[in-house]
Image (cartoon, rainbow, N blue to C red):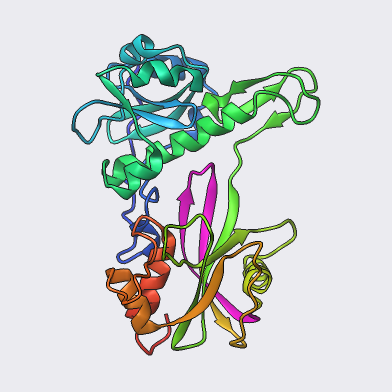
């Protein structure tokens, strides 16, 4: 049996890199994308005693009961005893451990919920409550996003025929029309608009009571990041925006987005809220924003938790003081 390919030295994140502070962003996988089409190597990895797999049930990760940094990992024997996977993918090598992802149907969830040796735990809760270390959360988020793509793309968008997974789970092929389909990532702009001393925050009806956050929206075809920022802010809050600057990004596996965090300069202070998009939007001073981050705002207003890139955009604004972010 050949050894699993060794992981090369990886460059550490740049000191102070803002993106690395967000949930799901730390992902040290050596993806071995060039090896995904070599069936013999993938089969060797499946029987390697070091190999582990994540299990996603519908869209929810399955964990082993108890504590442990690696409780989201299962041996293939353990996974086989839990259920028969609908799909599987090779994610890559993390240190000396080859990692796969497996998808079980959502219909398995009720039976698994009654077992004492495993527990279904939503990915948001895992991130928000710090139940897994960052080095584990990033690959698990990737597994969830990839399995969700497989779950939704069992049929060809071109002709409607069934598709089959190839290249270690990173492509689906249609035998009927020869179309090839690849995992998608949806780009989303999330922006903190400022006028120097204040920042613009909004809230949607589904937010927790009193929580305000940065505005956000999907990038549309033909748009630059900067144009998407300007369009979304104008549509949602009626505020014209000039200069836009990238600050950080975050993988967001709900189901599979990339949050592109930007700072944007307001050209006028007037707010016209689109009530179909937002419940409210208003300007906050730097001091108010700091109190919201600290959970000490006198009106009980709050900001997103540290797992979200919006938290770090707001913190960057607060910590910049009177200087530019």
**Residue in view at x 65 percent, y 78 percent:** 272
Q: Is residue 172 left or right of residue 48?
A: right
- Residue 122 lies, with reference to residue 18, above or below; the image says above
* Residue 320 visible in image: no
Q: Is residue 249 magenta?
A: yes
**Residue in view at x 34 percent, y 72 percent:** 292
What is the quadrant of the C terminus in the image?
bottom left
Q: Position of residue 245 (x, y in %)?
A: 53, 74
Rendering quarter of residue 32: top left
Q: Position of residue 284 (x, y in %)?
A: 44, 81
**Residue in view at x 43 percent, y 85 percent:** 324
Q: Is residue 27 left or right of residue 249?
A: left
Span highlighted in magenta in the image: 239-261
* Residue 266 visible in image: yes
The answer to which of 265 and 205 lies nearer the viewer is 205
Magenta segment's dominant SS is: strand
- Residue 154 lies, with reference to residue 93, above or below; the image says above
- Residue 21 lies, with reference to residue 265, above or below; the image says above
Q: Is residue 153 magenta?
A: no
Rendering quarter of residue 298: bottom left
The answer to which of 93 and 148 lies nearer the viewer is 148
Kindly give the residue lying farthest to the left in the view shown: 67
Q: Position of residue 188 (x, y in %)?
A: 58, 57
């Amino acid at each position: 049996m050949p050894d699993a390919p060794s992981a090369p030295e990886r460059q550490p994140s740049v000191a102070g890199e803002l993106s690395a502070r967000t949930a799901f962003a730390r992902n040290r996988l050596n993806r071995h994308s060039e090896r995904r089409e070599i069936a013999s190597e993938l089969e060797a990895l499946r029987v390697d005693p070091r190999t582990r797999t994540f299990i996603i049930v519908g869209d929810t990760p399955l964990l082993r009961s108890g504590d442990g940094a690696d409780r989201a990992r299962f041996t293939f024997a353990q996974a086989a005893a839990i259920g028969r996977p609908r799909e599987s993918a090779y994610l890559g090598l993390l240190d000396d451990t080859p990692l796969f992802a497996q998808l079980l149907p959502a219909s398995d969830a009720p039976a698994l919920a009654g077992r004492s040796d495993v527990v279904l735990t939503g990915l948001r809760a895992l991130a928000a409550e710090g139940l897994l270390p960052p080095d584990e959360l990033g690959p698990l988020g990737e597994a969830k996003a990839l399995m969700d793509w497989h779950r939704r793309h069992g049929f060809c968008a071109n002709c409607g025929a069934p598709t089959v997974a190839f290249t270690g789970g990173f492509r689906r092929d249609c035998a009927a029309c020869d179309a090839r389909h690849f995992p998608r990532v949806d780009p989303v702009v999330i922006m903190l608009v400022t006028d120097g001393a204040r920042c613009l925050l909004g809230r949607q009806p589904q937010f927790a009571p009193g929580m305000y956050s940065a505005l956000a929206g999907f990038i549309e075809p033909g748009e630059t990041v900067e144009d998407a920022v300007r369009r979304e802010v104008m549509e949602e809050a009626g505020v014209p925006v000039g200069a836009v600057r990238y600050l950080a990004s975050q993988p967001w596996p709900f189901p599979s987005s990339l949050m592109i965090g930007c700072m944007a300069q307001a050209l006028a202070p007037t707010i016209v809220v689109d009530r179909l998009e937002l419940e409210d939007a208003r300007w906050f001073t730097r001091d108010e924003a700091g109190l919201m981050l600290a959970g000490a705002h006198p009106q009980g207003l709050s900001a997103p938790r540290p797992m979200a890139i919006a938290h770090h955009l707001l913190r960057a604004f607060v910590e910049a003081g009177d200087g530019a972010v």
